[in-house]
Image (cartoon, rainbow, N blue to C red):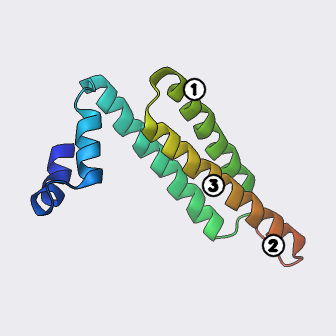
Amino acid sequence: MLHVITLHELSEDPKDLVANYLLNSTRHLSSGTKTFAAIYLLWHGAVKVGLVAALLSRKRWAYPAAMAAFFLFLVYQIYRYSHTAAPALLVLSIIDILIIILTWLEYQRLTKHHGFTGA
């Protein structure tokens, strides 16, 4: 599947760094590992999309829920990294840390304003 996704990019630039990294880093993975990774990333993305939609609607409950969900993903990713040393988990973890910080800062900013009426 990843080969199909990267085929166009590699046809334009056979030395494409990202496409080659993705292909080379997944060649050794078992079918079960690939399936788990796909399901995890889909779940990770679905939760984030749902929470971001609630955040954009400025729902008060979404801020703590988002921070908790992102923190749980972060804990799991660090746990998995301790067993696999997969660099992709570190990248995903750094992104989650940034999202947690930005969500916290926005939550603090909105709670200081009296106009925050999110339900």
Between label 1 and label 2, give the one nearer the viewer: 1
Q: Earlier in the sequence, mark 1 or mark 2?
A: 1
Pointer 3 local density, CA inside 10 Å: few below 14, some 14–19, many at least 20 = few
Q: Given the image, on which type of amino acid does mark 2 rest?
A: Thr
Where is the N terminus found, in terms of image quarters? top left
Q: Given the image, on which type of amino acid does mark 3 rest?
A: Leu
Where in the figure is residue 119, as x and y percent of width and height? 76, 65
Relative to 27, say whether 109 is above or below: below
Between 21 and 83, the residue placed more toward the observer is: 21
Q: Residue at x 28, y 44 (%)?
A: 21
Q: Earlier in the sequence, mark 3 or mark 1?
A: 1
Label placed on residue 117: 2
Q: CA distance from mark 3 to mark 1?
A: 18 Å
Residue 71 visible here: yes
Q: Residue at x 51, y 27 (%)?
A: 80
Q: Which residue is mark 3?
A: 98
Label placed on residue 6: none
Where in the figure is residue 83, as x and y percent of width and height? 50, 20
Q: Which residue is mark 1?
A: 79
Q: Secondary structure at mark 1?
A: helix
On the picture, is 77 further left or further right than 99? left
Relative to 3, say whether 57 is above or below: below
Between 27 and 31, the residue placed more toward the observer is: 27
Q: CA distance from mark 1 to mark 2?
A: 37 Å
Q: Residue at x 35, y 38 (%)?
A: 38
Query: Hey, which residue is sitting farthest front in the picture?
Result: 15
Pointer 1 local density, CA inside 10 Å: few below 14, some 14–19, many at least 20 = few
Q: Secondary structure at mark 3?
A: helix
On the picture, is 40 further left or further right than 65? left
